[in-house]
Image: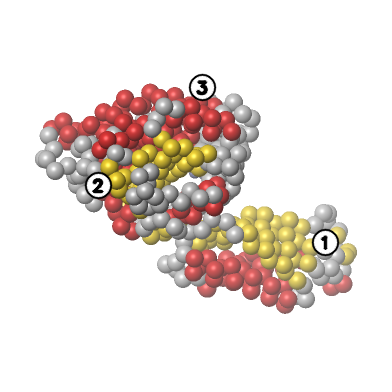
Amino acid sequence: MAKSESKKPASAAQEKHGVATALKDQVGGLMETTVALRRELHRWPEIGNTLPKTREQVLSALEGLPLDLTLHQTTSGIAAMLTGDKPGPTVMLRGDMDALPMPEDTGLDFASKTDGCMHACGHDTHTSMLVSAAKLLSERRGELPGRVLFMFQPGEEGHHGAKFMLEEGLLDVAKGKNGSDSPITAAYALHITSSLPNGVVGTRGGPLMASSDVVSIKITGKGGHASEPFRTLDPIPVACEIVQALQMMITRRIETFDPAVVTITKLVAGTTTNVIPESALIEGTIRAVSEKTRNKVHDSIRRVAERIAEAYEMQATVEIKVGYPVTVNDAPSAEFALGVAESVLGEGKAIQMPSPVMGAEDFSYVLNKIPGAMVFLGGTPNGVNPATAAPNHSNRVIFEESAMAHGVALYSALALRTLGVTLN
Ligand SMILES: [Zn+2]
Ligand SMILES: [Zn+2]
């Protein structure tokens, strides 16, 4: 990890504030509007790929900036391009904008005003931080050798928003305004988490987050009287056996150091105590951190379920709904991001994560096309233990708003450093 991006030795003041003093002063000047926009987004959360109010709020916050805006048609996505005064490559920064279908019980005075909808994953902070990074970098346009593409993305929470934006040509920006070649050479995303202390960030090279697929297994037998099971084909014990065997399959057929999770979360069968039903339904989630293991788990679930059912003269129909791919950070980009983070946040504040987390992210679609990295931003409320803080997706989660200063600085610094600008 780079200790310092500055050429000059750090002064006492720089030491205290980290090296990027001018950058931090700029961020400081933007905090009031960053917090205000975040709270406004938090009050009016929207779900999925169509976020009309959110898009309006973002566009109004970006008004007056020297950006070329592309309003996506298939979703509420916004691609905003900042062209520096000097030629160079393009770096992309992503902020997701969507909320979750759940109630909010935080008691915050800017809590959601939309029933059953909450920004519980902090995407309101991402959007707001990215807007402020766009403002900060616009002020520095004169020193930018290249371009910055701000990707405001809807539909991260399971709606494949990033995929839709890619399909609509998000990355077709190879030529700069003057015709010079300016391809996207790197892409970065931040994700706030209430489980990491304020002022700390973490990431790793390679797999960072898991793939996420849904499995549904229907076992079909033959119904009848509960007192005479031998005259029926009872799907319930077979369903139970399949649930157990899937756990056995994970421990005995999947490599220990390339792990997977299969969690059965739903088992539905029967109506009363004296009827054997005709069928039983099992559903759950599949997580893996490599495409190789992901495919192996899919095949193994089919084999185990179908053959156990067959052993009892029944039939198992397995459906796997494919979700987000594994989020794989480009290793040099992750190292670079940690170095930049340390120069912005101070020594020891950029943590190399020992292992991936099993949640999923659709930034994975972007990272499958462009080298880059996703970075977790610490957002535990000050004075709260990160280990016991209400986690992301909790109806009680609270994010430390002052953490957004670190996020704005980091987004901006990642763009500046990628384009070769020394931080000051
Ligand atoms: Zn989430
Ligand atoms: Zn999220």
Residue 82, given in percent of the width and then of the height, sits at 38, 39
Q: Residue at x 54, y 71 (%)?
A: 296
Residue 327, given in percent of the width and then of the height, sits at 45, 56
> Considering only order in the chain, which callout, 2 or 3, is on the residue closer to the N terminus?
3
Q: Residue at x 38, y 43 (%)?
A: 177
Residue at which label 3 appears: 109
Instruction: Calculate the distance from the C-alpha at mark 3 to the C-alpha at mark 2.
Output: 42 Å
Residue 72 lies, with reference to residue 205, above or below; the image says above
Nearer the viewer's eye, disc 2 or disc 1? 2
Instruction: Calculate the distance from the C-alpha at mark 2 to the C-alpha at mark 1.
Output: 67 Å
Residue 277 lies, with reference to residue 62, above or below; the image says below
Quadrant in which the C terminus is drawn: top left
Q: Residue at x 57, y 56 (%)?
A: 323
Element assignment for label 2: loop
How many residues crowd around disc 2 within 10 Å: few (fewer than 14), some, or many (20 or more)? few
Numbered circle sitting on residue 420: 2
Which quadrant of the structure image shows residue 73?
A: top right
Nearer the viewer's eye, disc 1 or disc 3? 3
Q: Is residue 96 left or right of residue 183?
A: right
Q: Residue at x 68, y 66 (%)?
A: 318
Residue at which label 1 appears: 277
Q: Is residue 2 left or right of residue 125?
A: left
Element assignment for label 3: loop
Can the viewer see residue 55? yes
Say whether mark 1 is within 8 Å of ligand 1.
no
331 or 67: nearer the viewer: 67
Element assignment for label 1: loop
Amino acid bearing label 3: Asp
Nearer the viewer's eye, disc 3 or disc 2? 2
267 or 204: nearer the viewer: 204
Amino acid bearing label 2: Gly
